[in-house]
Image: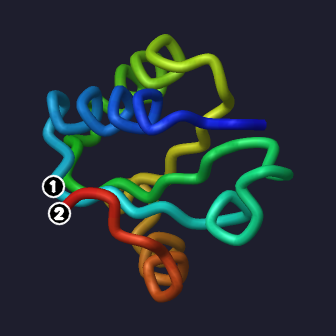
Amino acid sequence: MSVSTEQLEKVLATLRTLGARRVLLFGSYTHDPEHAHDIDLAVEGIPLGCLWRADGEVASAVDVPVDLIFKEEMPEFFALVSKDAQVLYE
């Protein structure tokens, strides 16, 4: 899988539009982007009522699988992945 900078920027722009204050990259893509099957992002700041919309808009924005973890929905998991994550937007 190859993800372009443009695709990542589209995802970040979409998340910012929906209220994201912080977006973190974690998972296999951070260690081995050429062999990763998806992009894992931890997101903070999107209201609970907009989480489904965020998932849908991100899926429509790029042609690679993106898994979103929302702090507002899973604060413990967000805290765990944020320890080793790369900050993409803050």
Instruction: Judge left or right: residue 29 versus residue 9.
Output: right
Mark 2 is surrounded, within 10 Å at the Cα level, by few (under 14), some (14 to 19) or many (20 or more) other residues, namely few
Residue 50 rendering spot, x and y as whole percentages: 28, 29
Amino acid carrying label 2: it is: Glu
Where residue 41 is drawn, which disc sits there?
none
Q: How far, Cα to Cα, is label 1 from label 2? A: 6 Å
Quadrant hosting residue 89 = bottom left
Instruction: Judge left or right: residue 18 versus residue 82.
Output: left
* Lower position in the chain sequence, tag 1 or tag 2: 1
- Residue that numbered label 2 is attached to: 90
Comparing 60 with 71, the one in front is 60
How many numbered dots are placed on residues in this image? 2
Quadrant hosting residue 67 = top right
Residue 83 rendering spot, x and y as whole percentages: 47, 88
- Residue that numbered label 1 is attached to: 21
Image quadrant occupied by the C terminus: bottom left
Q: Residue at x 34, y 69 (%)?
A: 87
